Amino acid sequence: INFDGRELLKCEYDKIDAFESVKNAFIITKDGKVGVCDNFGNILVEPKYKEIKKMGEDNKKEFIIVNSENKYGVALSDKTIDLECKYTDIKPLTANSVYVLKEDGKWKILNSSETVKIEEGISDVTEMTAEYFVVKNGNKYGVINKKGETVIPTEIEYIFAFVCRIFNITATP
């Protein structure tokens, strides 16, 4: 019920929680399954998942969903599924519907038109923009572009942040 006394959601949910750092979105729980609603009571993602995670900071359009078999997918706020639950992990990183996901033990970049395979040995993808991804190989960092091509080899001690085409690098002389 809002401050005007209008019912936003029926009393059929077991729990309604705020979605941390996502404005105007709430996690709803019904019969042990979770979904998402907005602050007007509109269901954005039906409550039928084991877990729902945010996709980036204050992103109310895409949500990481986890089914009962612990497979990951992506649901959109218009009640459609962008990626079916078949991946072993999905990073909460996105830029223009480009996803970083793990399938068959390997990290991949997936956009609407193609899957870009990341070079062998990449153990993690830590950050991304629309064009670039910070990757990790063991304890060294590097940068690849959205085609999977190496921009900075994975020989750097630490790449901790970047904006557009500027990379902040910590390296041992």
Image: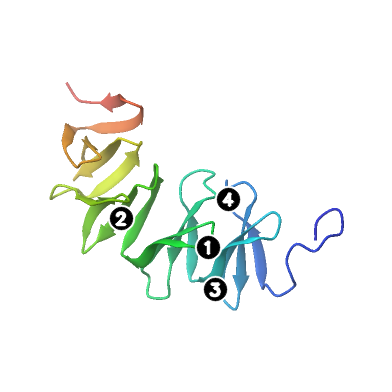
Q: Identify the amino acid type marked 3.
A: Lys
Residue 20 is tagged as: 4
Q: Identify the amino acid type marked 1.
A: Lys
Tell me the distance, in whole angstroms, between the alpha carbons under discs 4 and 3: 18 Å
In the depicted view, which residue is nearer to us: 45 or 58? 45
Q: Is residue 154 visible?
A: no
Label located before the other in sequence (1 or 4):
4
Label located before the other in sequence (3 or 1):
3
Quarter of the figure with residue 8: bottom right
Numbered label tally: 4
Question: Do labels 2 and 1 touch, CB within 8 Å?
Answer: no
Dot 2 corresponds to which residue?
101
Q: Identify the amino acid type marked 2.
A: Leu
As drawn, which residue projects farthest toward the front?
113
Q: Position of residue 65 (x, y in %)?
A: 45, 63
As drawn, which residue projects farthest toward the right?
4
Q: Identify the amino acid type marked 4.
A: Glu
Q: Position of residue 172 (x, y in %)?
A: 19, 25
Residue shown at 64% from the left, 60% from the top: 17
Label located before the other in sequence (4 or 3):
4
Which one is in front in this view, the residue at disc 3 or the one at disc 1?
Answer: 1
Graded by Cα atoms within 10 Å as few (under 14), some (14 to 19) or many (20 or more), the crowding at tag 1 reads few
Residue shown at 74% from the left, 71% from the top: 10
Tell me the distance, in whole angstroms, between the alpha carbons under discs 2 and 1: 21 Å
- Label 1 secondary element: loop
Tell me the distance, in whole angstroms, between the alpha carbons under discs 3 and 2: 23 Å
Residue 33 is tagged as: 3
Which one is in front in this view, the residue at disc 4 or the one at disc 2?
Answer: 2
Residue shown at 40% from the left, 43% from the top: 96
As drawn, which residue projects farthest toward the bottom?
31
- Label 4 secondary element: loop
